[in-house]
Image (spheres, rainbow, N blue to C red):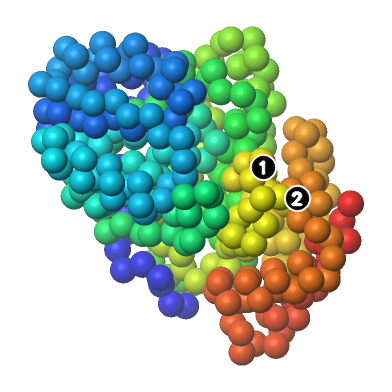
C-alpha cells in the first residue's frame, strides 16, 4: 500500500491542557520569541482577550491582536504573514475554532514563524494536526496543505472549551469517531504487514472510538452542569490530541477516508446549501457512506441512533444536499478521483456507486 506522507508528524511541540492554562500563554511565547501576533475569531477573542492581554503583557515586549472573520484562505494568510514580518512580530498565535486553528498554521507557513494554537472549542482536532484545510475567501474548499513540521504548542484551556455550545462538542466527537471507521476500511487484523504505523493508528482509534461512545453523554451532562470533570478533560484530550496523534501515525496509508472526502466535496460543490453545517456534522453523514463501503452497513443502525440522540443531521438532505441523480453523479466523480479508491478496479467503483445509492435513499 503506498504511503502518502514521507514522515511521521505525530504531535505538537508541547500540549498543555487544564483549567485556566491560558495564563501560561506568555511563557509559551517566550520559549519561541518575544512579540506575538494573535489572530482570532470574534467570539473567541471576546471570551479570551482579557486573559491573553494579561498573560502577554507580563511576558512579551509587544504584541498585536487581530480579529479574523473570513475563511482559512491563502490571500488573508499571506497578507498577515507580511504584516507580521514588517512589524517584527515573531510568533503566530491562533485563538478560536477549527478555521482559525488552520488559518494560524497557514500564516506561520508563509511567515516562516512558530505557531501556538489556543483552541476555544473541541469541534475538530485542527489545533493539533500538521495541515490546514484551505478555502476560498468565501468558504469553498480548495484542498489541504500538509506541512513538514508540527505546531509548536497547543494550549487547551478546559474552562474555556467547556463554554462551547454542545453542538460544537458533538461535532468534534463525530469527527473523531471517523478515524476508526475510515482506518478500518484498509485494516485486516489477520494481516501482518502494514504501512509503518497503521496498526498503531488502528489500535489507538479503537480505544478512542470506545471511550467517545461511552463517555459522550456524561461529558455533555457535566458541561451543562458547569462541572469540568475528569470525563470532560478526557473527551477534550481525545478529540484534540488523541485524534491528532492517530492522524499523524496513519499518514494517510491509502485510506479512502470517504467521510472526510464527502465533507470536502460538499463544501466545494454545495457551499451555499451546506455552509450552516459544521465539519463534524457533514463528516457524520459521510460516515454512513464509509460504513457501507467498508461492507458493514449494519453498523449504521448504531451510528444513526447516536446521530438522532444528539440531534445530528442524519441524511444528505439534512446537510443541504439535493437528493437527485445529478448530485449523486457529482459525488461519484468527486470521490472516485479524490480518494484512495482504485479507479481501475470495477469492484471498488461498484461499491462506491452502491454506497451513494444507499446514502441517497436515507431519509
Q: Residues within 10 Å of mark 2 (few under 14, many from 20)?
A: some
Q: Is 218 in front, or is 171?
A: 171
Up the image or down, 299 lies above or below 119; here it is: below
Image side of residue 39 versus residue 340, left or right: left
Between the residue at mark 2 and the residue at mark 1, the CA separation in whole angstroms equals 9 Å
Instruction: Inspect this view and state whether residue 297 appears.
Output: yes
Q: Is 101 in front, or is 216?
A: 101
Up the image or down, 27 lies above or below 274; here it is: above
Q: Is 1 in front, or is 136?
A: 136
**Which of disc 1 and disc 2 is earlier in sequence?**
1
Residue 33 placement (x, y as % from top left):
12, 32
Residue 129 placement (x, y as % from top left):
39, 48
Residue bearing the label numbered 2: 320
Image side of residue 195 versus residue 211, left or right: left
Up the image or down, 127 lies above or below 138; here it is: above
Residue bearing the label numbered 1: 277
Give the residue drawn at x 54%, y 67%: 255
Give the residue drawn at x 36%, y 16%: 49
Q: On residue 32, which mark appears? A: none
Residue 192 placement (x, y as % from top left):
49, 72
Amino acid at each position: 500500500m503506498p504511503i502518502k506522507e514521507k514522515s511521521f508528524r505525530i504531535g505538537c511541540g508541547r500540549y498543555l491542557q487544564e483549567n485556566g492554562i491560558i495564563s501560561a500563554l506568555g511563557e509559551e511565547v517566550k520559549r519561541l520569541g518575544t512579540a506575538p501576533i494573535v489572530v482570532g475569531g470574534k467570539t473567541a477573542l471576546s471570551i479570551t482577550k482579557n486573559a491573553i492581554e494579561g498573560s502577554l503583557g507580563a511576558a512579551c515586549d509587544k504584541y498585536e491582536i487581530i480579529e479574523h472573520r473570513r475563511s482559512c484562505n491563502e490571500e488573508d494568510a499571506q497578507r498577515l504573514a507580511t504584516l507580521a514580518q514588517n512589524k517584527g512580530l515573531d510568533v503566530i498565535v491562533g485563538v478560536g475554532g477549527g478555521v482559525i486553528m488552520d488559518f494560524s498554521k497557514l500564516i506561520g507557513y508563509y511567515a516562516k514563524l512558530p505557531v501556538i494554537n489556543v483552541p476555544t472549542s473541541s469541534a475538530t482536532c485542527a489545533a493539533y494536526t500538521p495541515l490546514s484545510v484551505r478555502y476560498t475567501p468565501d468558504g469553498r474548499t480548495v484542498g489541504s496543505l500538509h506541512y513538514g513540521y508540527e505546531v509548536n504548542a497547543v494550549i487547551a484551556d478546559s474552562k474555556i472549551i467547556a463554554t462551547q455550545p454542545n453542538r460544537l462538542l458533538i461535532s468534534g466527537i463525530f469527527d473523531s469517531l471517523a478515524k476508526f471507521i475510515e482506518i478500518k476500511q484498509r485494516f485486516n487484523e489477520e494481516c501482518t504487514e502494514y504501512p509503518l504505523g497503521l496498526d498503531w493508528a488502528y489500535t489507538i482509534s479503537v480505544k478512542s472510538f470506545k471511550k467517545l461512545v461511552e463517555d459522550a453523554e456524561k461529558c455533555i451532562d457535566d458541561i451543562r452542569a458547569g462541572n469540568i470533570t475528569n470525563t470532560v478533560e478526557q473527551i477534550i484530550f481525545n478529540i484534540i490530541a488523541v485524534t491528532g496523534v492517530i492522524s499523524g501515525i496513519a499518514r494517510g496509508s491509502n485510506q479512502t477516508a470517504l467521510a472526510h472526502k464527502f465533507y470536502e466535496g460538499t463544501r466545494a460543490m454545495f457551499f451555499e446549501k451546506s455552509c450552516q453545517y459544521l465539519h463534524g456534522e457533514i463528516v457524520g453523514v459521510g460516515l454512513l457512506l464509509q460504513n457501507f463501503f467498508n461492507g458493514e452497513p449494519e453498523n449504521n443502525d448504531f451510528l444513526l441512533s447516536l446521530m438522532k440522540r444528539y440531534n445530528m443531521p442524519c441524511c444528505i438532505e439534512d446537510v443541504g444536499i439535493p437528493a437527485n441523480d445529478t448530485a449523486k453523479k457529482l459525488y461519484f466523480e468527486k470521490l472516485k478521483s479524490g480518494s484512495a479508491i482504485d479507479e481501475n478496479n470495477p469492484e471498488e467503483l461498484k461499491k462506491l456507486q452502491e454506497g451513494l445509492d444507499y446514502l441517497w435513499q436515507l431519509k
